[in-house]
Amino acid sequence: MTAEIKNRISTAPVSPWFEVHPALGITPIDHLYNRLDGAYPKRWRELFPDAQSLQNWRESWVEALEDERITMDEVKFGIKECRRVCIHPPSITEFLKACRRSLDPLSAYHEAIAGLAARERGEVGSWSSLALYWAAVSMSYDLKMLTHGQIKSRWESVLAYQSALGVWEPIPDIALRVEYVPAVASPEVVQAAREVQNSFTKEPGFDHLRWAKRIIERWKAGDQTVPLVSLESAQVVMGYKARPDMNQALRSSNESLH
């Protein structure tokens, strides 16, 4: 690219694409021009018959690259894709499409399942793109609980939406997992706990049938709110099954409730 173009006053907006990159020694947009010129000898250069047409290309492509939030890594991928599939020099539309990796929904689904499983194990997981990661995170519950057939349409929509965003937050680090380790009591502590427990059950004068007696007393007093199940249990515990008079009274009470 000639010095005339580089030094020419332009209406181009301020952009990192027009700033000299330390590692490249030239601006990223000029580096892109050179790479495409190398990929399409003569044919690429013939597209720009004069300085104005070249400057128009620079400004137009930088505007598109920024609008679509294309990164330098995506540009590298786009150049490789153009060499692979484009016989003729690409238009801006073709180049932008080449920069974005096409995610096959089915392959992405299986990658998402494996990635989420890895995250649960405390691993980062293998993610081919940020768009795929955030699509998986937004549908993590469904991906774990439902089959591919049940979420196929929604998964494809979410994946397409994330892919179209063009910019994503980085994949977060794995959160520290706090595992519960139950404490193991010493034999002395266990024995002391057992003694305390036994002190309640072996309390002198403790009536273990008190609950049953109270239920029977409520029933005898005419309390109709006593549940029949509780009354029958109390009857069995108190040994009333052997008393015909009590059994007959209970049957009469049951019939009156119906």
Image (tube, helix red, strand yellow):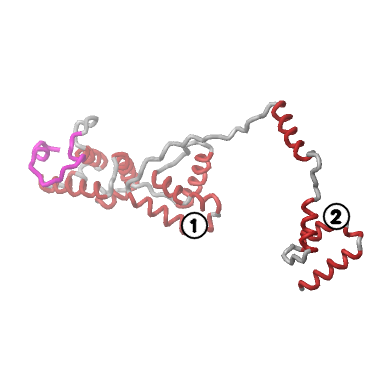
Q: Nearer the viewer, residue 60 or 240?
A: 240
- Give the percent coordinates (x, y) of residue 226: 74, 63
At x 49% / y 45%, what residue is drawn? 111
Q: Which residue is mark 2?
A: 238
Q: Does the magenta stretch mainly form a helix, a strand or a loop?
A: loop
- Give the percent coordinates (x, y) of residue 91: 25, 51
User: Magenta segment, which residues?
Assistant: 1-20
Q: Amino acid at mark 2?
A: Met
At x 45% / y 47%, what residue is drawn? 137
Q: Which residue is mark 1?
A: 152
Q: Is residue 226 above or below residue 120?
A: below
Count residues near mark 1 (Cα–Cα under 10 Å), then give few for <14, some for 14-19, many for 20+: some
Q: Is residue 151 above or below residue 101?
A: below
Under circle 2, the secondary element is: helix
Count residues near mark 2 (Cα–Cα under 10 Å), then give few for <14, some for 14-19, many for 20+: some
- Give the percent coordinates (x, y) of residue 214: 77, 56
At x 19% / y 39%, what residue is drawn? 30
Question: Is residue 11 part of the magenta span, yes or no?
Answer: yes
Does residue 31 appear left or right of residue 258 in this picture? Answer: left
Does residue 31 appear left or right of residue 189 in this picture? Answer: left
- Ranked by sequence position, the earlier of labels 2 and 1 is 1
When asked about the image quadrant of residue 251, the answer is bottom right
Cα separation, mark 2 vs mark 1, equals: 63 Å
The quadrant the N terminus occupies is top left
Q: Nearer the viewer, residue 128 or 234?
A: 234
Q: Nearer the viewer, residue 87 or 169?
A: 169
The quadrant the C terminus occupies is bottom right
At x 84% / y 54%, what residue is drawn? 237
Of the numbered discs in the image, which one, if any, rests on residue 186? none
Q: Amino acid at mark 1?
A: Lys
